[in-house]
Image (cartoon, rainbow, N blue to C red):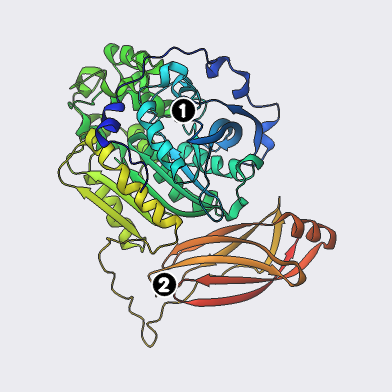
Amino acid sequence: MRGIIDPAAVALGFFLAPASASAVTPPNADSFYTPPPGFSAAPPGTVFRARPVALQELSNSDSAGAYQLLYRTTSATGQPIATVTTLLLPSLPASGPRKLLSYQTAEDSLTTNCAPSYTMRGGNNGGSTQWAESGEITQALLQGWDVVVPDYQGPQSEWAVGPIEGQATLDSVRAVEHFSAAQLPGTHTAVAMVGYSGGSIPTLWASTQAHRYAPELNLVGSASGGNVPDLIENLARVNGGPFAGAIIGVSVAINRAYPDLGLDALLNAGGRQLAARDGSDADGCAGSVTNAPFGTVGEYTNYATAQELAALPQVRRVFARLDLIGGPLPAAPAFIYNEANDELAITPPVDKMVASYCARGATIDYDRNPAGEHLTGAGAYVQPAFEYLQARFAGQPPPDTCPPRPPAAHPGNHRPRPATVTGTRRLRAVRGRVAIRLGCPVQTASCGGTVVVRAGRQGTLGSSRFHIAAGGQQLVTVRLRPGPQRALRQAGSLPVTIVIRSAGTGISTWKAKLRA
């Protein structure tokens, strides 16, 4: 593997910034970040404007150029918003079709002055984690991959709010796949995702949202370290520890997404003062992680203990929206890494999440390092994560540390069955997309594969990957190619064949009628 960076430097870089000046216009004063009138009517992933940019920490030998794109995405509550992503092109692309790595930085901040689109250009002195993260991005460029780095927290800087972060990550991929300078093969692009600590949240959420939100993407794998699948369990364990300040900082961001949390009423005077500092990043990018070491819930809220605070109905209700345990499965094989002694991203919830994924048929490589903690884990994670993603891009079989799953009992037929088309076979194309409901028989562990829509002389209209738990159903969205879209509009309807390719279970076909 070429150009592995020093793990100790990565860990140190998480809390050190280069001391360089900047003349870059901040996002809140830069009109590039403002979406055009009527932007909300555009489909997610639509690019509104683009510009070439110069980035710090990267030489011409690393990158052939970089661009920033303003694109449409979706808030945690389903509202249209716009955010920015940064695309970096490798100087020497890897052989074969171009590949795309979506890299989610550990932003962990509460203003757009700490968004990677700004700090990567040298804004805000590079940001508190940007030096280390730029080294990892360089490593990806040296593999010959295109790299996209989204401002996944959105315009309100909603740190740790998984629903918006995952959707913004997926829409960033959509945006660059159709940006001509990227030279990517559209939705056929092999896409991998990676992120540590705060970057693990958008990575995990995007991988589990992809089936529903962006089923047309060709995700081949994800790698996430320092994971936080259950924020409410983290609250109790981080309380009183070295990173206790994160409790207030994360709560500020969550309250922006879900005002029904009612944060102001939960905090005492000291807590409101700290929340105000955090909300303006007064202690620097990611400053709220370290600005209240060994603080407690009793010190900053109107409640004596973390357990008392977590028991409040509005707290339980809001934080339940941010819980990944028992949620949808990742859309592709996943490498999940945590240090057993991590004091910020505690391990017990990760154990539960992985156990849930494994029990439902996901392919997971879980590395639970028994020796380190959060900062040392940042460096130790880099090499295995990149090696894992290299293997996924190369099409190698993914490692699976899940316990062996016994075959499901079914009298007279133990062979797994492929997914089937359920509901009506009279389909309708809306905005160039067709929704097909698939079902997975209860007697098999799970159903995964690809659904393809074909139409006679038109050939393949489009395809999409899927993964369904045993006994479940999924609405799979297939994006039609432009040519067949025009043919369908002209003809009004087309007889089509739905082909379902499932690993280990062969191919099944279904006839249907597709209307414009």
Q: Which mark is residue 155?
A: none
Viewer-closest of 321 and 497: 497
Viewer-closest of 398 and 44: 398
* Mark 2: amino acid: Val
**Furthest residue to the front?**
61
Q: Name the residue rendered at 17%, 26% in the picture.
A: 240
**Furthest residue to the bottom?**
412
Q: Identify the image quadrant of residue 50.
A: top right
Query: Badge 2: how crowded within 10 Å, few (<14), some, or many (20+)?
Result: some
Q: Which mark is residue 442?
A: 2
Q: Is residue 382 left or right of residue 171?
A: left
Sooner in the amino-acid sequence: mark 1 or mark 2: 1
**Furthest residue to the right?**
490
Q: Position of residue 418 (x, y in %)?
A: 49, 74
Q: Which mark is residue 116?
A: 1
Count the numbered circles shown: 2
| Disc 1, SS | helix
* Mark 1: amino acid: Pro
Q: Determine if residue 516 is in view.
A: no
Q: Could you give the CA–CA distance between mark 1 and mark 2, rounded to whole angstroms?
A: 45 Å
Q: Position of residue 507 (x, y in %)?
A: 54, 76
Query: Badge 1: how crowded within 10 Å, few (<14), some, or many (20+)?
Result: many
Q: Identify the image quadrant of residue 81.
A: top right
Q: Position of residue 257 (x, y in %)?
A: 46, 30
Q: Name the residue rendered at 31%, 27% in the picture.
A: 13
**Furthest residue to the left?**
371
